[in-house]
């Protein structure tokens, strides 16, 4: 079972920031938070990941609460092309790999960016 | 261009007729995986492979086989397809070991219909 809880759907106006929440109250100390997105029927696309510090890359920012029980993915200026299902995933990252490295997808949040 | 390719992209077949969906990656990734995606169920892992000749079951392996004879290829085999295997299938690959970024790259998907 997925260890995360996300809203089923969200709307965002084009050009505005999209803030997607994720609850992961049972996260362990060695589990990372990953975000992927899937644009209609395409393969999922990696967005960002973090352990406990906030992270930013060219696509998005990831804000993780101090207790690590929740996080927020921020798309700073959403465009119509950001309409997709966004998945929040927690997983252990091991230096030698292993089954704990497998991705377990939940149902995600369907983000609709509207003009 | 770094990519994961799958073939065929679309396939309609009949019950019991053996089929193979190919997956190939050009990134020298050690880890490869197969997922199926069904409405309301999200992505579920079928099989994964940590390296050549090393494969293991995911969450829904029944009715599927895989092989990993070469690093770049990870075919999915349905020996006797049934209608409940009608689904959208994704292959994925990632680096393994010595990296804290287990970003998985996904293929474009194969839509399989079994009648």
Image (cartoon, rainbow, N blue to C red):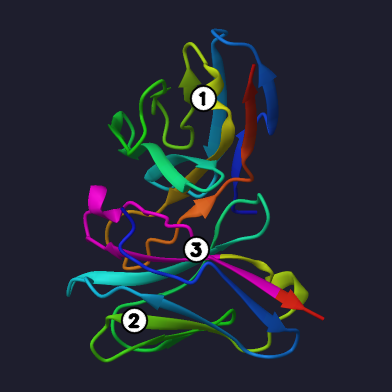
**Residue B66, located in which quarter of the rendered image?**
top left
Residue A108, numbered label: 3
| Discs 2, 1: same chain | no
**Count of numbered circles on the image:** 3
Query: Can you say whether B105 is above or below B77 in the image?
Result: below
Who's the residue at 57% across and 8% down the image?
B17
Nearest to the observer: residue B33 or residue B10: B10
- Count neighbours of disc 1 (C-alpha within 10 A) and say few if under 14, some if 14 to 19, many if 20 or more: few
For disc 2, the marked residue is A70
Who's the residue at 46% across and 56% down the image?
B104
Query: Can you say whether B19 is above or below A52 in the image?
Result: above
- The residues bearing labels 3 and 2 have C-alpha atoms spaced at a distance of 15 Å
Secondary structure at badge 3 equals loop
> Is residue A104 located in the magenta-colored stretch of the structure?
yes
Who's the residue at 64% across and 25% down the image?
B113
Q: Earlier in the sequence, mark 3 or mark 2?
A: 2
- Count neighbours of disc 2 (C-alpha within 10 A) and say few if under 14, some if 14 to 19, many if 20 or more: some
Q: Which residues are magenta?
A: A86-112
For disc 1, the marked residue is B84
């Amino acid at each position: 079972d997925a260890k995360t809880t996300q809203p089923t759907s969200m709307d965002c106006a084009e050009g505005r920031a999209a803030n997607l929440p994720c609850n992961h109250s049972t996260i362990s100390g060695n589990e990372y938070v990953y975000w992927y997105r899937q644009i209609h029927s395409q393969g999922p696309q990696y967005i960002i990941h973090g352990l406990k510090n906030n992270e930013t890359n060219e696509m998005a920012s990831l804000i993780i609460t101090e207790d690590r029980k929740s996080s927020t993915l921020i798309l700073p200026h959403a465009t119509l092309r950001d309409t997709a299902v966004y998945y929040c995933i927690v997983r252990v990252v091991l230096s030698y790999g292993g089954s704990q490295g497998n991705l377990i997808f939940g149902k995600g949040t369907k983000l609709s960016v509207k003009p | 261009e770094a990519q994961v390719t799958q073939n065929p992209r679309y396939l309609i077949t009949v019950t019991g007729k053996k089929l193979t969906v190919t997956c190939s990656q050009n990134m020298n990734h050690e880890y490869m995986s197969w997922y199926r995606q069904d409405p309301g169920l999200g992505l579920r892992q079928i099989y994964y492979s940590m390296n050549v000749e090393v494969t293991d079951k995911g969450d829904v392996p029944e009715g599927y086989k895989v092989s990993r004879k070469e690093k770049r290829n990870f075919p999915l085999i349905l020996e006797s397809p049934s209608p409940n295997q009608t689904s959208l299938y994704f292959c994925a690959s990632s680096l393994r070991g010595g990296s804290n970024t287990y970003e998985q790259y996904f293929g474009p998907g194969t839509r399989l219909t079994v009648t």
